[in-house]
Amino acid sequence: MPTDSALLAEVPFFQLLDETERAHLAERLDDVAFRKGEVIFKYGDPGDSLYLIRQGEIEAFVRDNTGARIVLERSTVGDFFGELSLLDGGPRTASVEVVADLEAVRLDRGDLDEFLRLHPAAALDLLTAMGRRLRQTSERLRHTASRNVNEEAEDRRTVIQKSADWISEFSGSIPFLAIHIVIFAIWIALNIERVQGSGVNIFGSSAFDPFPFGLLTMVVSLEAIILSVFVLLSQNRQAAKDRVRSDIEYDVNLKAELEVAHLHEKIDHLHGELLQRLAAIEKQAGKGA
């Protein structure tokens, strides 16, 4: 089947195989066809096969808890789908519907196993191709839904932002208040005049800032201005952190909703199959009676 061998050569999953290996693998491919609107498989269905598209188009999708259709990808001529089930024999991770009349070839897990027994060296080529695909997927999923908002924000802080956070945190603490109470008490004590207008404090030395403590008022005002700037900087950072937290919470909630929707869809599918089997059993029991 030279056509199927050429088709395999265009699929990244099989590109590392040599021509002989691709030709032998092509001999094990089965021709399949589906009409527009047919569902090839549903999410959660058992699966052990890979499909290569010769002609037509398919749509891989899932449904959320409201029943809305979320399209994951559209595949056309030369594309492939179902490779995960081919490798691990696990359930399908999405539903696939035919968008345009489909002609494809199917490779079953048993045929692949037989091929690898005859060509064991090809297994390393397939693992290499799968490793490349996994690396690409890992890069895309590097930022998962569950993230630590503090780590996300901390990694991007500049020196000024770190200083603003530290100053804002310290200015709202009890030690900050205690230090200022001590400083103000000493300042006022050093500048309370023994006799008003004498310029001499209660300790007998010169008062450098007599009542109404104009210098102290100016120092406190300047400190308040500087602190307010740092507090505003820290608040802006906190607002940015809150936005990151909101985005993360949205991603987590969306992921949870999709998982719940997948479970509902799977249960509904199993329920439908159970009803069909019960109906068949009742029909057989009726015939037996």
Image (cartoon, grey):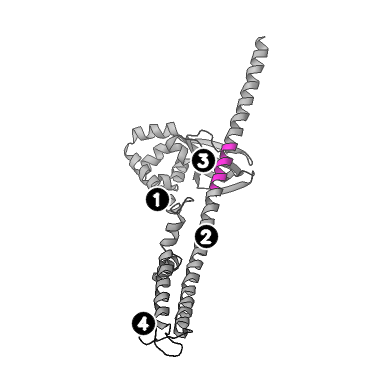
Q: Which residues are magenta?
A: 254-264
Q: Main secondary structure of the magenta part?
A: helix
Three-letter amino acid code at the position of disc 3: Thr
The label on residue 242 is 2
- The Cα atoms of the two marked residues, 2 and 4, are separated by 53 Å
In this rendered view, identify the residue nearer to me: 270 or 183: 183
Whether pointer 1 and pointer 2 mark residues with C-beta atoms closer than 8 Å, the reply is no
Three-letter amino acid code at the position of disc 4: Phe
Residue 234 in the image: above or below residue 217? above
Give the residue drawn at x 46%, y 74%. 227
- The Cα atoms of the two marked residues, 3 and 1, are separated by 19 Å
- The Cα atoms of the two marked residues, 3 and 4, are separated by 84 Å
Label 2: state its secondary structure. Answer: helix
Sequence order check, earlier mark of 2 and 4:
4
Label 1: state its secondary structure. Answer: helix
The label on residue 185 is none
- The Cα atoms of the two marked residues, 4 and 1, are separated by 76 Å
Question: Can you say which quadrant of the picture contains the N terminus?
Answer: top left
- The Cα atoms of the two marked residues, 1 and 2, are separated by 31 Å
- The Cα atoms of the two marked residues, 2 and 3, are separated by 33 Å
Residue 148 in the image: above or below residue 189? above
Q: Residue furthest front?
A: 195
Whether pointer 3 and pointer 1 mark residues with C-beta atoms closer than 8 Å, the reply is no
Sequence order check, earlier mark of 4 and 1:
1
The label on residue 135 is 1
The label on residue 93 is 3
